[in-house]
Image (cartoon, rainbow, N blue to C red):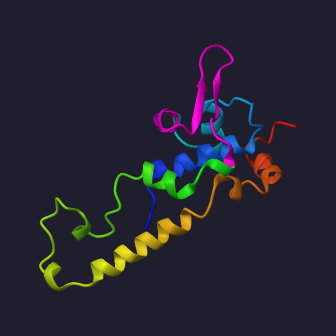
Amino acid sequence: MRLTLYTDYSLRVLLYLGAKNIEDLSTIKEISDAYGISKNHLMKVTHELGKLGYIETVRGRGGGIRLALKPKDIVIGKLVRQTEEDFYLVDCFNPESVGCIISPVCSLKGALNKALHAYITVLDTYTLDDFLHSKEELAALLFPNQK
């Protein structure tokens, strides 16, 4: 299973914000510069993260974004389910697909479906907080010019 860039960027934004003090605001430009990724992509991602309730946006001069939830309340599996377009590991997972000629007798789909559920179940056991244990080291990499 491979996550889309959208989900990857969503996770990166949350890690960036989680590495900061909870009340500190960040800008999309700061996050874009830190990761070397497109500001336009991050604008879409942060907009969706705001709609989903993961981040809050403060408008105006000196505004920015910050986590709306505590890191321990952000379940990674839930985020992945909300940000991935689909989980079509193979063509036969797509209900709009013409299908595969062996679908009526193929047991591979069942095994792949079981594996997919196991994958998401594992991600459900982690929160953002689990990935912030090395917060100081993470902050040093993401904000090298800050004290």
Q: Is residue 54 magenta?
A: yes
Residue placed most toward the observer, 140 or 132: 132
Asked where in the image residue 16 lies, by quadrant, the reply is top right
> Where's the C terminus, which quadrant?
top right
Residue 33 position in % (x across, y down): 64, 38
Look at 46% across and 37% down and name the residue there: 48
> Where's the N terminus, which quadrant?
bottom left
Q: Is residue 85 magenta?
A: no
Look at 35% across and 77% down and name the residue there: 112
Horizontally, residue 122 falls left or right of residue 129, namely left
Residue 108 position in % (x across, y down): 29, 82
Residue 116 position in % (x across, y down): 41, 70
Residue 120 position in % (x across, y down): 48, 65
Residue 53 vertical position relative to residue 60 in the rendered view, above or below: below
Horizontally, residue 110 falls left or right of residue 55, namely left
Look at 44% across and 49% down and name the residue there: 82
Where does the magenta region start and end? 43-71
Residue 33 vertical position relative to residue 78 in the rendered view, above or below: above
